[in-house]
Amino acid sequence: MLRERIIQQATDLFSFHGIKNVSMDDLASSLGVSKRTIYQYFKNKEDILKSCILSFCENRDRRIIEIMAQSENVVCGCLQIINDYKYTRFPAAIFWEDIYKYYPEVYQYILEDVRKSNIYLKRLLKEGIKDNFFRKKINFDETVLLLDISTCIKICGIYSVRVSLSRTELISNIMVNMLRGISTSKGIEIIDKYIADLPNSNN
């Protein structure tokens, strides 16, 4: 449907150029349609942006639920989510800067989405503790905060240390090691097997 095409194209343009740098004329031209056609589906650019964010969040949540339902246990599920995360294309830093500066309503929606995601993550941690995959003495808030920071680094590229790994590989390794750090011997065994089975693994 055209509405979905508009959302996808807008997501691509906003992600690469930022939101303020993309006009409705730019979007219409890239789609080969008139602005009038776009306005049949959306009130304005902010309305399109909200739909882009909502679409991303819904697709992400759907994929996470699918992964967890198919996984043998919570550790396997978390590892698969991290693996998927490696291949997720996140917008450039300018995209997030524009949202923060010019679209406060969208920014608040994102903060609420982060809050809900953190609640779900804590639920997974508790499930892992119950099944003896994660250590009982976990600081939930600290663990969630560290994962949030890792996400921010991946999204915005806010690290300056020169490393041979790509940003994606670096953050993936950080997340796997964080998961290993909160795991029991039972959980570590699963993680180590996962790492050993990775293509081109040095382990």
Image: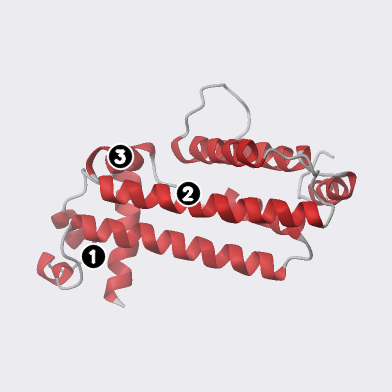
Which residue lies under the disc numbered 3? 100
User: Outermost residue, top direction?
Assistant: 161
**Mark 2 in CB contact with mark 3 (< 8 angstroms):** no
Q: Percent from the top left, x then y, of residue 131?
A: 82, 57
Query: Could you say which is closer to the camera, residue 106 or residue 138?
Result: 138
Q: How many marks?
A: 3
> Which badge, 1 or 3, comes first in the chain's sequence?
1
Q: Quadrant of the C terminus?
A: top right
**Residue shown at 39% from the left, 41% from the top:** 92
Horizontal arrangement in the rendering, residue 42 relative to residue 183 (left or right): left
- CA gap between label 2 and label 1 equals 31 Å
Q: Is residue 147 above or below residue 112?
A: above
The residue that label 2 is drawn on is: 114
The numbered mark, 2 or 3, whose residue comes first in the sequence reads 3
At a point 51% along the width and 22% down the height, the residue shown is 160
Q: Position of residue 16 (x, y in %)?
A: 34, 46
Residue at 59% across, 62% down: 64
Real-space CA distance between mark 1 and mark 3, rounded to the nearest whole angstrom: 27 Å
Q: Amino acid at mark 1?
A: Leu
Contact (CB < 8 A) between labels 2 and 1? no
Q: In the drawing, what numbered circle is on residue 2?
A: none
